[in-house]
Amino acid sequence: MKSKNKIILGVLFLMACKSSIYAQHGKNKPVVVDGKKIAYKTFNIENRKVGEPILVFESGLGGGTFDPILPFLPNHISGIQYERNGVGQSELDLEITSDSQIAERLHNLLRTLNVKPPYLLVGHSIGGPYIRLFAAKFPEEVCGLVFSDPTDFMLSSEENEEARIKSESATGYHEVFFQIQKMMSENKDFSQGAQNDATRALKSNASGYFQEYRHLPPLNKSIAVTVIISYNKHIEHPDEEMNKNLNLGINFKPWWKEYDNLRIQHFSDLIKDNDSSMIILLPKYSHGIYYQNPKLVAQLIIENYNSSIKGK
């Protein structure tokens, strides 16, 4: 079963490392939000001046930490990391089943802690869709978005099928996305928090692949957006092993090429009307970009932060 963990994590934009590696470091604090305990931690918040952006981090599926980035951020930039309900030290809330509720709970956490906007949201993997949804719900409170190798929540069923056919593969991205979440929710080798998070994600997508996102309003044009995408990834042995064992029939190189091209196009369209926005393409990088090159990711966050200040 341990090998399954590595397989699951290698093939999709979900998590980059095992949950043991992704465990939160440092001291978390508890706070009760909407009747449920949430664990969080802040940095440099005592240095924040009124009206300055604050970083708000949203992890990938199963939770995680952005600690590798923090040493490369200057002391005047403050931020908050938290664990979603059911992950890590945060209390499970079975009432939360949708991504909209994830965004609303995060907003309530910030209000409970009296952490005032503007917010510069940083989302990794499936955390990317979550911060996009937050920006749709609270557009006047968000000044910047940084997507770290985000899941392509804009991939339509028609595009999914066309990419599958073009790559001469038997299984498309949508199908693998659901299969991996299901496997992760049932696999006891993952932490209970990771299983809880995958179970909730499955419920959220029960009506279809990111259905909540189909009719979002355009991004507020004043929001600075940075999208960091790894592409042309190395095909690892565990990926090939999974492909064979589950009889997925994926031709990985053309498969990734088709879906990466769509992802790049979708995020390009997302930011086309936004000033001070950019897409950074990192060939042959891993999904865990901020582990592989935390200094680079920190610098891109700083640039977004400075753009957000200039745009005020």
Image: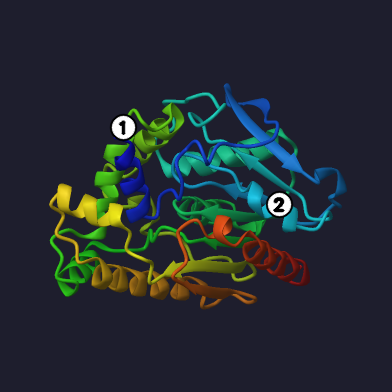
Q: Determine which residue is flagged by label 1.
A: 187
Front residue (pair 309, 186): 186
Front residue (pair 208, 136): 208
Left or right relative to 246: residue 304: right
Three-letter amino acid code of the residue under disc 2: Leu
Residue under the point 51% across and 31% down = 85
Quarter of the image with the N terminus is top left
Instruction: Rate crowding at label 1 as few (under 14), some (14 to 19) or many (20 or more) other CA atoms within 10 Å.
Output: some
Q: Determine which residue is flagged by label 2.
A: 70
SS category of the residue bearing label 1: loop
Left or right relative to 201: residue 76: right
Give how far apart the Cα atoms at labels 1 and 2 are: 32 Å
Quadrant of residue 225 in the image? Answer: bottom right
Front residue (pair 296, 14): 296
Residue under the point 28% across and 63% down = 156
Q: Is tag 1's residue or tag 2's residue first in the polypeptide sequence?
A: 2
Residue 199, placed above or below residue 241: above
Residue 292 x/y as whole percent: 55, 59
Residue 147, placed above or below residue 273: above
Count every numbered label the image shows and give the total: 2
